[in-house]
Amino acid sequence: MITLTERHRVAILVSLIAISVFLTYYFHAVLMFGTVFSHFFYIPIILTALWWDKRSILVALFLGGLVVVGTLGFSPDPLALDDYARILMFIVVASVVASLSEQLRKREREVKKQRDLVQRYLDVAGILFVVISRDHTIRLINRDGCEMLGYREEELLGKDWFETLVPETLREARRQIFDAVISGDGTSRGRRENTVVTRNGTEVILAWRDAVLTGDDDRPVAMIGSGSDITDRIRVEEELRAAHDEANLYLDIMAHDINNANAVALGYTDLLIEMLEGKERQMVLKLRGGISRSIEIIQNVSTIRRLHSGDDAMAPVDLDAVIRAGIAHHSDARILYEGEPIMVMADDLLPEVFMNLFSNSIKFGEPGVEVRVRIKDEDGVVEVSVEDTGPGVPDPVKPMLFTRFTRGTNTRSGKGLGLYITRMLVERYGGRIRIEDRVPGHPGEGAAFRFTLQRCDQPISARS
């Protein structure tokens, strides 16, 4: 589209007025005919109205004056009613076209103002915004998008989005998806990852969203898309994933080898316990306790790793079977339980809760400590209580007991990982855990660990 400068417009108008003066002279003085030629005068009047609004009235008056001068100067007849009507039409046309032109120009200014405002919003958004028309050309792109892609705005406007910015291997598939969405045969796929190619050939991964723009007839005319550069984040995530997998590999190897070594050492210590007596036997028993603690540490690390991985899905678990298995593991302890089959939502880490609570009560209880497990089912929530007759937990320690690495006051206190893991597991299952006095108001007469689980009403199959 050719854009005329102010100088060009003035030159055109002067030429048309000169032609109008010549036509006035030629038709009146030479042809002696003054009716048709003045229709030409509408051309400079309309152009002046379009270019300079109400200044066209001055041109209309000047050209009307030519009609008067031509008629009075070259025609023996006086001015007729048609001449006055023609002059009036010049002024009316100039006024109407000038008014319409002014309204159109005002509307264009308002549209430009709104467009500039939108452009400013897009330029400070910090992400790429682009409008792609039905024919795949770029109609609008913001400053951040240009900087991200390494182009100037004028280098992208009007260019084919897919040919210019989409990797060749993905180009045809992405074009087909675009055409399907813009034609109404497909739907936008929401947030996704899209790869684009910058000016220097680097591939950038964008977190992409798009939406279809429709015209006044509700037909799709373009698509607006937005994308933020997540290339570095994706790269970091891949590196972290690789490092995580490598660390897990080392942990698996270490746990496997250490557990094998512990199993061998435990077997030999059991043999020595049977063979020795007196101080030697007591020393071997302490050795066996150290090996057991090593096994417990490895088990805790494995449990915490599984908790953080979040790979285990919740499923119905037979709580009664889990409790009885935990009691069987501590066959040398006095653990009382009367229960019946009941299903709760958990995973295969639920036995760790009871292993930790039973071990805690036995480890810190006095010789001959008694542990009792109680189950209460109310309104779809199962409350489990593990109570012991040990020395209990002082009130100041209770609020911190389930935090990581918190020690109790007992000389045999451990690192606190067991109860920390227990809390994590219970909360993972949607429950809460707390510690109370077994006998309310008497902390020295034993502790009561109480936690909740979500009941599952799925039928229980017969236990083997």
Image (cartoon, helix red, strand yellow):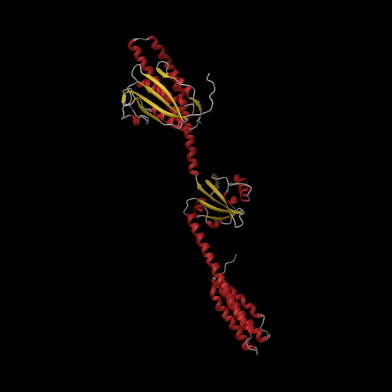
- Closer to us: 12 or 455: 455
| Place of residue 447 in the rendered image (x, y in percent of width and height, measured from the top left) | 35, 24
Q: Quadrant of residue 157?
A: bottom right
Residue 203: in sight, yes or no?
A: no
Residue at the limit of the structure toward the front, as seen here: 379
Q: Is residue 343 left or right of residue 134?
A: left
| Quarter containing the N terminus | bottom right
| Above or below for 408 versus 152 | above
- Closer to us: 455 or 220: 455
Q: Residue at x 41, y 13 (%)?
A: 270
| Place of residue 410 in the rendered image (x, y in percent of width and height, measured from the top left) | 31, 24
- Closer to us: 363 or 301: 363
Q: Residue at x 60, y 45 (%)?
A: 170
| Place of residue 51 in the rendered image (x, y in percent of width and height, measured from the top left) | 56, 71
| Above or below for 392 versus 216 | above
Residue 68: in sight, yes or no?
A: yes
| Place of residue 423 in the rendered image (x, y in percent of width and height, measured from the top left) | 41, 30
Q: How many marks?
A: 0
| Above or below for 442 versus 140 | above
